[in-house]
Image: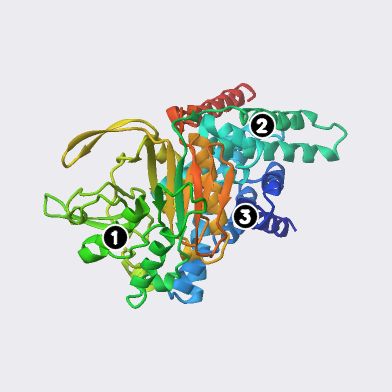
């Protein structure tokens, strides 16, 4: 019976990471309740083996039903046989399940009691496991429990110690709830656990009222393009040019407000599916002419190839910035145009782990081996506004976006330049690989967390969704419908000022974890 309950709880738990599945107001409480089901069993277990089994079945159900959309990319678009695609999803889910299972095993080894101290230990181990999962072997922090809380009280803690701190507090709240549940069958109610739970939530709600940043300069008009190009057409030579043109036609549509023509147009990831030097100058002249007519800067997602001085080639998944004054020749020269190169590459999609070339060939991923971009790259500047780009799933690694918030001296081929800190963040993505799945809503939740952590607006230009404007508080201001072609015209207020998390990154989280584990060891020794 416990296995069935935990299987169901894990499936429900996975649904709390996307507002497209459940009402937004239900995500945070349902995440706490479903995780509390597992924690209740962990407090009751007598053996490590039992704790491992309970945690693994919950986590496997959670991940399989949370990242099922990988099956769509491998089977529908990669033409991998359904049994193999399903097996790949299960194997990845099993690997991801090892982290919470390890936390549960260590927790059981410590022989905790269902008490406040026990709840703190479990939450600390669970939060640390979330960080490990996001770090080991390039990391995959998708479905971090913090993301169920971007619209809830716990998000108020994110500007202090980021998503891993929020994950730890979410685990703490779930553990406190499970302690209260366990004591319901006894004569002595554990009211202290409820008091602690509501204290954490109340403090988080209070922290949400703090303005960590403030407006700088006048708002800027931005257009976000959502082309809704089918993934099968994107790299098809017969439809490639028409697919590209559809995006640029959207860019030149009349403004929603004739008085506010877009000053910046942001296109999705790789709307140009070939390298810039493979396209004729006439093509680029046409794009530059469109930008001139629109009187706008274009931020375009494209693969970019560059010959380096050491006779090697740099191949990047990139964003280039062009406008009506961009010389055509600049697109064929090293560092000829402002450019951002993706630095956190997707395994199998953008780089091939050793020994897995056969798998990439089997599922037909185009452009499998990209070069890694520099750690700190120049932000894009339009007038007084400073835009910090990121591509695809780079925005799920919160600490990697922080350096762009601060001014820096950037080394380029032509020398050192001073680059201001970002006032606006933007992400370009292509989630067409995953169809009309919960992946779109899950990614949107993570983008909200990045806005909260940095106190900067986050703009998202995607091929199929979610194309959206999120303000510096993490609030969704506007969004295009999924799987539709269109543009989102917005006025974006740039922000300046820094959250504590922007300065200290994950260090506060690490210090807390180390301190609590040390404190528990000392306490354990005194009682034995």
Q: Position of residue 318 (x, y in %)?
A: 32, 53
Between marks 2 and 3 in the image, the one whose residue lies nearer the viewer? 2
Q: Mark 1: which secondary structure?
A: loop
Q: Mark 2: which secondary structure?
A: helix
In this rendered view, identify the residue nearer to me: 421 or 434: 421
Quadrant containing the N terminus is bottom right
In this rendered view, identify the residue nearer to me: 172 or 285: 285
Q: Is residue 152 above or below residue 85?
A: above
Q: Tag 2 or tag 1, which sits nearer the N-term?
A: 2
Residue in the image at 22% along x and 55% along y: 331
> Exactly how many numbered labels are in the figure?
3
Q: Is residue 144 above or below residue 282?
A: above
How crowded is the residue under tag 2: few (<14 C-alpha within 10 Å), some, or many (20+)? Answer: some
Q: Is residue 83 above or below residue 201?
A: below
Q: Is residue 111 visible?
A: no
How crowded is the residue under tag 3: few (<14 C-alpha within 10 Å), some, or many (20+)? Answer: many
Q: Tag 3 or tag 1, which sits nearer the N-term?
A: 3
Q: Tag 3 or tag 2, which sits nearer the N-term?
A: 3
- Res. 279 image quadrant: bottom left
Q: Is residue 67 visible?
A: yes
How crowded is the residue under tag 1: few (<14 C-alpha within 10 Å), some, or many (20+)? Answer: some
Residue in the image at 58% along x and 37% along y: 166
**Numbered label attached to residue 369:** 1
Residue in the image at 45% along x and 70% along y: 230
The span from disc 1 to disc 2 (Cα, nearest Å) is 44 Å
**Numbered label attached to residue 14:** 3
**Numbered label attached to residue 205:** 2
In the orientation shown, which residue stands out farthest toward the top? 526
């Amino acid at each position: 019976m416990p296995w069935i309950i935990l299987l169901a709880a894990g499936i429900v738990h996975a649904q709390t990471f996307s507002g497209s599945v459940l009402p937004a107001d239900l995500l945070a409480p349902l995440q706490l309740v479903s995780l509390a089901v597992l924690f209740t069993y962990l407090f009751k277990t007598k053996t490590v083996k039992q704790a491992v089994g309970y945690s693994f079945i919950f986590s496997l159900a959670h991940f399989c039903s949370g990242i099922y959309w990988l099956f769509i990319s491998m089977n529908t678009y990669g033409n991998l046989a359904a049994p193999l695609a399903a097996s790949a999803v299960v194997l990845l889910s099993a690997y991801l399940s090892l982290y919470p299972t390890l936390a549960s095993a260590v927790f059981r080894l410590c022989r905790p009691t269902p008490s406040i101290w026990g709840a703190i230990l479990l939450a600390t181990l669970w939060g640390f496991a979330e960080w490990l999962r996001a770090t080991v072997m390039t990391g995959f922090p998708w479905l971090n429990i913090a993301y169920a809380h971007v619209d809830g009280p716990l998000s108020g803690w994110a500007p202090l110690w980021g998503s891993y701190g929020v994950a730890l507090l979410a685990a703490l709240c779930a553990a406190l709830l499970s302690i209260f549940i366990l004591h319901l069958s006894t004569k002595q109610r554990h009211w202290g656990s409820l008091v602690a739970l509501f204290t954490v939530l109340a403090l988080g709600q209070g922290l949400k009222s703090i303005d960590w940043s403030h407006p700088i300069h006048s708002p800027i008009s931005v257009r976000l393009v959502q082309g809704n190009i089918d993934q099968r057409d994107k790299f098809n030579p017969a439809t490639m040019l028409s697919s590209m043109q559809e995006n640029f036609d959207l860019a030149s549509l009349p403004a929603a407000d004739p008085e506010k023509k877009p000053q910046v147009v942001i296109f999705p990831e790789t709307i140009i599916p070939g390298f810039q030097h493979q396209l004729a100058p006439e093509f680029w002249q046409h794009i530059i002419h469109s930008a001139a007519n629109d009187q706008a800067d274009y931020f375009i997602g494209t693969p970019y190839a560059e010959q380096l001085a050491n006779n090697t080639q740099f191949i990047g998944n990139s964003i280039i910035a062009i406008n009506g004054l961009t010389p055509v020749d600049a697109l064929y020269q090293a560092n000829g145009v402002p450019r951002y190169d993706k630095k956190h590459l997707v395994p199998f999609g953008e780089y091939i782990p050793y020994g897995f070339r056969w798998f990439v060939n089997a599922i037909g991923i185009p452009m499998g081996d990209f070069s890694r971009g520099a750690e700190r790259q120049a932000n894009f500047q339009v007038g007084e506004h400073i835009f910090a780009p990121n591509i695809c799933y780079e925005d799920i690694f919160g600490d990697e976006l922080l350096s762009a918030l601060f001014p820096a001296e950037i080394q380029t081929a032509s020398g050192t330049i001073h680059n201001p800190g970002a006032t606006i963040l933007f992400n370009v993505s292509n989630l067409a690989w995953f169809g009309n799945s919960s992946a779109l809503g899950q990614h949107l939740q993570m983008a909200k967390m990045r806005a909260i952590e940095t106190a900067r607006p986050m703009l998202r230009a995607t091929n199929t969704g979610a194309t959206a404007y999120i303000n510096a508080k993490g609030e969704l201001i506007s969004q295009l419908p999924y799987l539709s072609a269109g543009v989102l015209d917005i006025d974006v207020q740039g922000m300046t000022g820094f959250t504590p998390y922007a300065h200290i990154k994950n260090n506060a989280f690490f210090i807390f974890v180390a301190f609590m584990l040390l404190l528990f060891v000392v306490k354990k020794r005194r009682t034995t």
